Structures are given as C-alpha cells and as structure tokens.
Image: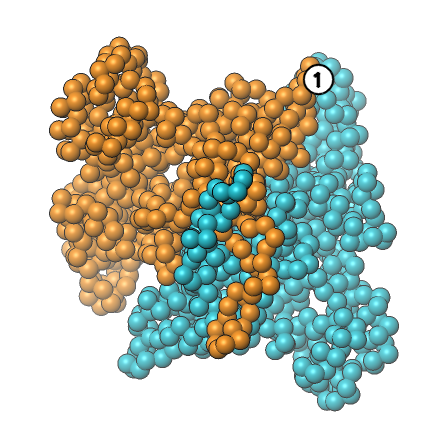
Chain colours: A cyan, B orange
Amino acid sequence: MAKGLPTRSENYSEWYNELVKKADLAENSAVRGCMIIKPYGYSIWEKMQRALDDMFKETGHSNAYFPLFIPKSFLSKEASHVEGFAKECAVVTHYRLKNDPDGKGVIVDPEAKLEEELIVRPTSETVIWSTYKNWVQSYRDLPILINQWANVVRWEMRTRIFLRTAEFLWQEGHTAHATQKEAEDETRQMLEIYAQFAEEWMALPVIKGAKTANERFAGAEETLCIEAMMQDGKALQAGTSHFLGQNFAKAFDVKFQDKAGNLEHVWGTSWGVSTRLMGALIMAHSDDNGLVLPPKLAPIQVVIVPIFKGDEQLDAISEKIDPLVKVLKSKKISVKFDKDDQARPGWKFAEYELKGVPVRVAVGMRDLESGTVEVARRDTLEKSVVPIEGLDAYIEQLLEDIQTNIYKKALDFRTENIFKIDTWDDFLVQIEKGGFLSAHWDGTSETEEKIKELTKATIRCIPLDTEEEAGSCVFSGKPSAQRVVFARAY
Amino acid sequence: MAKGLPTRSENYSEWYNELVKKADLAENSAVRGCMIIKPYGYSIWEKMQRALDDMFKETGHSNAYFPLFIPKSFLSKEASHVEGFAKECAVVTHYRLKNDPDGKGVIVDPEAKLEEELIVRPTSETVIWSTYKNWVQSYRDLPILINQWANVVRWEMRTRIFLRTAEFLWQEGHTAHATQKEAEDETRQMLEIYAQFAEEWMALPVIKGAKTANERFAGAEETLCIEAMMQDGKALQAGTSHFLGQNFAKAFDVKFQDKAGNLEHVWGTSWGVSTRLMGALIMAHSDDNGLVLPPKLAPIQVVIVPIFKGDEQLDAISEKIDPLVKVLKSKKISVKFDKDDQARPGWKFAEYELKGVPVRVAVGMRDLESGTVEVARRDTLEKSVVPIEGLDAYIEQLLEDIQTNIYKKALDFRTENIFKIDTWDDFLVQIEKGGFLSAHWDGTSETEEKIKELTKATIRCIPLDTEEEAGSCVFSGKPSAQRVVFARAY
C-alpha cells in the first residue's frame, strides 16, 4: 500500500480524504467548504467535460452563459424551489469596501448596500426561465436546448471534498418544449446520456431510476437519476435529470402560441452532473496503493520509466523508446517518458501507482539486449515481459482491456452487493453490512421517512426498465407493485 | 444595411449595442451589469477559449480551479491591490435566507451572518498566492505554471455589454518562479501569445507595450498589454500580462530554498484575457450590414442556401450539394446547408450577413444546369459564379483569403489612423478626430494626468520593440526618449 495512505478496510473515509490529497487531485481552501482543484485533478475533470460536452452537442444542445447572481425575489417565485434552496444560500448584500476609519484593513461600506440582495446561484432555473420568457413567443421558438458550464454555491453545513462542497463546478442543462411528451423524452434522453457517460467513460455501472417525491429536485414533477455503488457499499447519486412540467413556465409566465393559435405554458427540463463525479470515480475504483483511473479519463495513460545509470545508458534507452513514444502519441495515447534522473525508479513506480496511471513500462539495459520491456497494469498490478517490437499495438489493446476490466470489476462488486430483502429483520441486518437493498415499499412518504429514521437508508431510486412484481412492503407489509433500491448514501 | 441597425457613422455606440442584440450574441440580464451570453455569442467565445487553451498548454501551463470567494482579510494583504479593487467588490455577508415572518417571500436570516465577509473574486492573486505558500518549499517546486478559466465580478458603475460588465468570463494565469528573469520572460511570453492569438485568430492587429505606472495592475511591478484600434479610432486594451515582482510572495510569505540553501521570496506573474475580446472582435471588423467574423472564429464558416420551389427541386439541389457538405465537413469546415422552407432566400441572405457567416453559397435550378453556384464573401460582399466541380477547394482557399483580408483591412485602417504628433495644438485637433497619437511624453504622472484631464486621452502603452528617439514632451516640452501611444479608449 502507498506510504501514509490508510487502507480501505482500516478507514474508508480517511483513505478517501488522504488519497485525494496525496494524488494531488484537490485540497481544501481557506474558505470554508470551498475546494481548490489542483492541476492533476482538474485535468481529469477537463476530460469528463469534453466527453459530456461532445455528447450534449451531438444531441442538439448549445452552450450559453447566464449570470452568477440571482435577485432574491426570483428565488421566491417557484414555491417549492425556494423552500429547497433558501436555507443554503450565499447572499450578496453590498457592493463596495472602504478603508476602516478606526485602523488598518478594509470594512464593508454601509453606504453601498444593495436595494435587493443577490443570491449566488445554487442552480439557475429561476434566472434562466425569467430569460426564456423573452425568448419564447411562438412554437417556432421551441425547443430551446441550452447547457451551461458553471460554478454554483450551496452553503452546506457538512462538506466533503468533491462530494459535498459549498462551491462546485457543474453543467446544468435547461430546455423548453412545446409539449409534455417532448419534455419527458428529453428528460429521459439526458438520463441515458449520463448513464452512457458513467459506464463508457468512468467505467462505472449505474442504476437508472426515478426519485421518490421526497427526494425530488425542488420544483420538479419528476426527478430521474443514476445511482452508483461505492466500494464501501454506499450509494452515490451521480447525475439527475428533471422533468419540470410547467412549474417554472408558470412561475415566470413563459407562454407560447401553438400551431392552433392557443397560448400555452411551456414545458421544461433541467439536468446536471458536477465535480461530485470526481468523488465517484475515486471511490469506485481506487485501491490501497492509490488511484485507479479508467484509461479514457486518465491524464497520463502510459508512463515509461527508464532504468539507467548515467547519460550513456539513458541515450541507449531513449534511442529505442523515443520512436515508440512518437507512435503512441500519433495514436492519441497520452504518454510520459520520465527521464528525470533525480528520482529513483522505485520512487517513480510508487508515485505513478498512486496517481493511477493505467500502464507502466519499465525498461533497462538488460531489456534492450533481450528486446523486451516490463509492462505493469495498474488495475490488477500484474506485470508482463513484452517484446518491444509491436509494443504500441500491445499497449493500445491493453488500455482497452483495462477500461473493460475496471468496469467489469465494479459491476461484479455491485452484483455481489445487491440483496433482495423481503423481511424487516433481514433489512436491519443487511443495511449494517452495506450494499443496495432491493425491497418492496408501499409507496408512502411516511414509510420512507420511518425507514430513514430507523436505518439511515434512503430510497435511492425506483428503477426504470424493471419488471413489476407484486409483493408487500418490507416495513409496513402493505401491498407493493415493484421493488425499490434502499441504501445509505453519500 | 441591416434592418433596424443604425449605421456606424450615424451612431457608432448604438450600432454596437444593436448589433450585439440583433446578431444574438448577448443581452443584458435582470441583474444590473450582468450579461447573458447567448448560444451564438458563446460559441465564438468557446472557439477563442479552445485556441488560447491550446496555446497555454503548448507552453507548459495546466488548468486548475480556485475558490470563487476571497476572505476579506486576504484582499488587504497587498496594499496597492486592495486599493485597486476594494471599491468595486460584491460582498457576501450572509449564508441563509428565511421566510419573511411578516408576509410572503424570503428575507436574509440575520442569524446567518458570516464571521468574516467574503468577496466575490475580482481577480484571484490573493487566494492563489495564499495557496502557493503551501505548495512551495524548494526550488524543485518551481516554476508553478497554472491557468484558470473562471467568472469574476467587478462592480462597475457604468457597464457596457462585453466591454465592461459586472460579471465577466476570463482566464487568469498565475505563475511562480525562482528568478526575476524567469518571471519577466514568462510575462513577455504570455504577451506574445496574446498578440499572436489576436492577430492570427481574431485578425486583429495589436500594439504590444508597457503600461505607465498609473495604468498598471494593482499589485504589479510592470504591466504589459496589447492595444487594438476600433473602427471609431478608439483604443481597446485586449489583454494584459503582469510582472508581479515579489509583491504577492511577500504579502503571503511565499519563500523557497534555492540551490545554495538560501530562503528567498518567489517571483510571480499573472495574465488574462476576458469576454471583452468579444467586444473587440465585433467593433474591429463588423459593418453596417452586421457582424463580420474572421473564419477561424466563425461558428458557421459556410452557409449554403438552396433556392427552390417544392420538394422535387430541393431534392435535385440536395443531390448535388450533400456530397459537397460531406467533403467540407471532412476538412473540418463548419457548414450549414439551410433547407428550411419557411423562410425566403432573401431573408436568409440578410440573416447570415447579420450573423457574419464568412461564405455564403446560393444554388438554384439554373445553377444546377450550368454546373455553377453563386458564392458571396461576407468581408467584401463580392459575389462570384463558381463551378461546383472543385468548389470545396475553392471555399477552403476563400476562407483563408477572408481571414487574411480582414486582418489586412484592420491593419490598413490602423496604419491610416496612427499619427505622429509633435505639437500640443496638433494633439488637441487630432484627438477630437480620433485615432492613435504617437507623441513624446516626459515620463511623469503629472503630465499624463493633465493630458487625460484636458483631452480624455490616456497613454495606452509605451510600445515595445520600437527604437528610441530623442524628442520633447508634446505637453511639457521636457526631454523624452521615446514616443508613446495616446488615445481615447474603451
């Protein structure tokens, strides 16, 4: 295991915190709850952004930018929305500082008080729907398919780096449609895109489902979500897609003339994923040696470590390896040939393991003689001796294998940790052990809340695409038509 | 000229405002001074971002992310920095709203007052240098070469869309170095990158220079800048690169052990360009018909407008044009084949002219017979009849020609509007006519301020890379070693 990194079994929570720090992903800032995303962490986020952005654009969405600040009165316009966000808002009340007349430093200038306070956006539905009002007159102005990459602020009391921070980065899609069906289809389409991204890029299997009324986005008619399982068996909500009905259109009076000439309220959706995905990525795959990154999101996919003494040996190795580096780069594989002579190979091995580089190639003088190198894969820690001849094709295939294997490992883990639970006694036992509990629920908020109170488990989702199955609620015994997923969650 | 768009000669300022609106680039929001960047405008900004980001990465920089909020006490640590920014800060004082006990709506919860107020970042030197303190111990930790894409807020009293807004988007580079020379080289390198970007991508000729002490960034030892000329003869500062000396290192106690074992303060730079560049792009090239976009930044480079009646004619045209579209796309040329049958060709022509699409191809039934199309270029409004055979290569070349021509036109305009001025009388006459005035200056702030007071002209920069020339100050008559550039500015 990596130096100074607790093992997962010792202390999963500390393992995560230390890993984020030691792998140079992020750190806490001087401002409570706000994080600094360091270059290595940010480069993973950039890869996520690029992949998602391409998927959004392929499905007809455009990016735009709306203000950071929301007038306080806007928040109040949608009743359940303000209820959901008012308690965790950063509020701007003044627009100027001045020198402290009593000494050094600066104070807020009491004369520079805003007439109406501004809220730092916790999400942008209100400011965006107040704008859509001016953009929409006729059915010809619809649909509006807009996404925004932005920072948002929610003043959380208990924060955790990447998972729950006061400021975080995200994308928020906000679409407007002429019909209910079109908006519902959009909601579902974006959920599918999130699921596809999680599985194909993050190697993270997810359960697609609907939230219960209790867990819905404040202002939505329906919230769809993807839920992933972490290695401690807890759930992490990795993305949400909301069908807003006509709620925000009504709150902001957004109407359009349909083909028949009638004035109707517009239908809306919103959907988002955030830097929380970084937390999911780390917690789903990494091990006691450090990060394990799926190749598609790894900033460095291949590191080549020469083992040498003196410039002459390094030159001999470089002569063989430089052309390989060139070929790998031409295949869009990101490769680092680490010629640094200040650090020892063993130190480098540990460092790149900690940072989750998927493939490590070690090559020394004896390897040159035999025409081979040692290839180590990060996911299984297996080492192989591989001919230099054809190494580029070998590595290309290996990266694909690693991507697939990481996904499969996470999927197997999840499969082993989903339990069909049919009695309350079993529920109480299993929830302490962890994992997802697939159980019947009577559909009432009362039961849902009681279960949460007794076990800290919440209904993660009502899975989509599963068959109905008659049964009785695991808690109340009342009839139920479908199993839902219970778990403790991040 | 475009419908409802004032001409530049009628009212340059209104022409700009209306153009921004009519071309769907941006609009003002409900929050004073904060803009909404609409999809068409944002897609230009995205192209700028991509090009700049590539240039930053090629020169060894990485992206990262630092908090939106800055503790008030941080701002005060660098004396001239706080002086420069305290008067235009958005201040967060509370972190919660609550229901108004006296009625409907929400109010700021007085019990949720922050112990220390937070400033919404106007720029991030303070929060970043407070972090670098923890990152730097030894010369081996240097240089740090970091860039951040972010939103910032400066509470400007008079705002103008893109040019001066309360919130704007930008990138801010923040680097830390072991030696003065390395930091100075970095400052100059980034200025060169900005100049290269302006000229090669924006087709905007710029003058590289140094700011006078009066106009320096608050906290910098030296500020380099690029200055561009708009079509009304006014100057626009398009980017700045600051040599910070050891000012922020001293304010935040950032020291490193050098190779000899001595503890030294770190040397710093910072540099940035913002959505202001959008304003520069619009004002430099556009005409009374609308936007003129350089092809390298145009979201749509080529639009093809079919002229047809009924599906049969459209099918016949599509049969010829679809393969062309495919070829253009394979050459990474962004092309739109506008088959919409609701709008007339004439309306489309005006619309794409307004939006600055560099190349328009019109094709009707008679064109098919003759095997030609009509190609119109946006920059000169010239039309040519061109064979369909080989049209892709023709367009490829034409896009390059347009890029070059737009640059040349702006350069010629600037050349015609830079005036060597040697007497105060000439200065007073010319400054009213507009343009850049190249004149001798005695080097004192007193003279600089007096000239500004009398004429509203500021010293835009002391040009780099120009020869020294002995002369006497245009205002005071005192000796001067070099001409500087005076102009009225945005």
The part of the image, by quadrant, that contains residue A384 is top right
Q: Residue furthest bottom?
A: A478
Task: Determine whether A199 is above or below A77 in the image.
Answer: above
Circle 1 chain: B
Q: How many marks?
A: 1
Image quadrant containing the N terminus of chain A: top right
Residue A29 percent across, percent down from the top left:
63, 45
Residue drawn at the location 13% of the way across and 47% of the way down = B10
Q: Secondary structure at mark 1?
A: loop
Direction from residue B337 to residue A57 in the image, left or right: right
Q: Nearer the viewer, residue A286 or A10?
A: A10
**Amino acid at circle 1:** Gly
Residue B55 percent across, percent down from the top left:
46, 33
Direction from residue A86 to residue A402 in the image, left or right: right
Residue drawn at the location 70% of the way across and 17% of the way down = B261
Residue carrying label 1: B261
Residue drawn at the location 18% of the way across and 33% of the way down = B434
Residue drawn at the location 81% of the way across and 40% of the way down = A4
Residue B316 percent across, percent down from the top left:
25, 60
Q: Can residue A110 be seen by looking at this rendering?
A: yes
Q: Residue furthest front?
A: A102
